[in-house]
Image: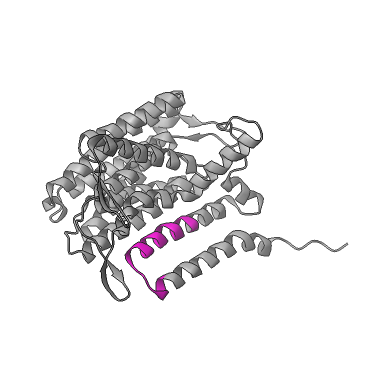
Amino acid sequence: MREYLVVFLVAGVVSYLLCVFAREAAIRSGAVARVRDRDVHATPIPYFGGVAMLGGLAAGLLLAFHLPFLSTAQPAVLHDSLWVLVAGAMICAVGVLDDLIELDALTKLGGQVVAAGVLVLNGVKLYSVRLPGVGQLSLDPTQGALLTVLLVVSVMNAVNFVDGLDGLAGGVVLIGAGAFFLFSYQLATLNGETLAITAALLCAAMGGACAGFLPHNFFPARIFMGDSGSMLLGMVLSGSALTLTGQFATVSVQRDGGLGQSTFVMLIPVLLPVVILIVPMADLVLAVVRRTRRGQAFYQPDKEHLHHRLLEVGHSQRRAVLIIWLWAGLLAFGGVLVGLYSGPVVYALLAGGFVLNVALTFLLPRLQRPAALPG
């Protein structure tokens, strides 16, 4: 655990420091987010936060390769981590080009598929899936490749979609990294496996990179992650999930005070990135439905997304972001708790978190609304 903490801290410090240089480079190269009708920022903000996070991620992973415990892990740990970093650097480069010259959607999608293909060609992919009531379902190379590319591309675009308010995407992915780190670390502990796990290492480095970036990005933001950052985070988040699938032949989880066997829990590595991002993904589906019913193209922007509605009901930008963080945390850590443990305490914690989130979302603006003046 101490070495993971060191990786987290180093990634955070490097990311924080590189943001200063990335911001200056973005300003000089003209990679700046202009103010559009649907945006909530009032002044142009430079991009390239993703470049700084890539530097933090690389620093954390390269350090891990020289730490006493992590450096002696199974060769697959370092191999898979390295290729996720390479694929992340590739998609970050595509994002930098998009931030500079605004690539068309098809070109950007092609870059995402190529980067996901790099993972597949180097063995970071789905080999099998555990299904409740069915057991281990082996995938042939074509099925595994297609499902892997679909997962990676979907998560990259979901993270890109959630990047709508200062600090929102970075915070959501930081929360997701923490939840997935907890899941993978505890799963290895319960099953007596080595604690040097690729997924945990990637999550520690990714979480640190996000933590170092957030002080520059939280409202009022001084730098945006841009597509270089959102696609990088989506790549690493999905890549960490892929490295964990199929790692355990049998899985023990804590059930009713003792250890029990579970196949469903191994769906969590695939489902957790979706669960973490379910709020923005649901917002995306609603946006498509809303625009289609109006006779608009589904990709035509508007100002009726979730974060716009939170601002309309009376939340400030900072509080709207914090509320979405809370919902992401409830879903992410709730999914981990339900997957690994059972019992009334777990369900009571989830119920309490749900009630608290509902109260903060809907009641807090009403309580703080000034009373109407008499007369």
Residue at coordinates 62% horizontally, 62% vertically from top-left? 364
Taking the magenta stretch, the answer to whether it contains residue 328 is: yes
Image quadrant in which the N terminus is located: bottom left
Residue positioned most to the left = 72
Position of 144 compared to 332: left or right? left
Instruction: Using the rendered image of the protein, determine whether residue 224 is visible from the camera's viewpoint.
Output: no
Image quadrant in which the C terminus is located: bottom right
Image coords of residue 339 (percent x, y): 35, 62
Image quadrant assignment for residue 113 = top left
Image coords of residue 59 (percent x, y): 25, 44
Could you say which is closer to the camera, residue 238 or residue 364?
Answer: 238
Residue at coordinates 41% horizontally, 74% vertically from top-left? 345
Residue at coordinates 58% horizontally, 31% vertically from top-left? 300
Residue positioned most to the front = 134
Position of 76 compared to 158: left or right? left
Q: Looking at the picture, does residue 39 appear above or below residue 104?
A: below
Chief secondary structure of the magenta portion: helix
Instruction: Using the rendered image of the protein, determine whether residue 261 is visible from the camera's viewpoint.
Output: yes
Q: Looking at the picture, does residue 285 appear above or below residue 258?
A: above
Position of 219 compared to 375: left or right? left
Image coords of residue 69 (percent x, y): 14, 56
Residue positioned most to the right = 375
Image quadrant assignment for residue 127 = top left
Image coords of residue 79 (percent x, y): 17, 42
Q: Report the magenta residues as a range.
A: 327-346
Position of 103 compared to 2: left or right? right
Taking the magenta stretch, the answer to whether it contains residue 19 is: no
Residue at coordinates 52% horizontally, 52% vertically from top-left? 321
Could you say which is closer to the camera, residue 81 or residue 351?
Answer: 351
Q: Looking at the picture, does residue 201 appear above or below residue 185?
A: above
Image quadrant assignment for residue 105 = top left
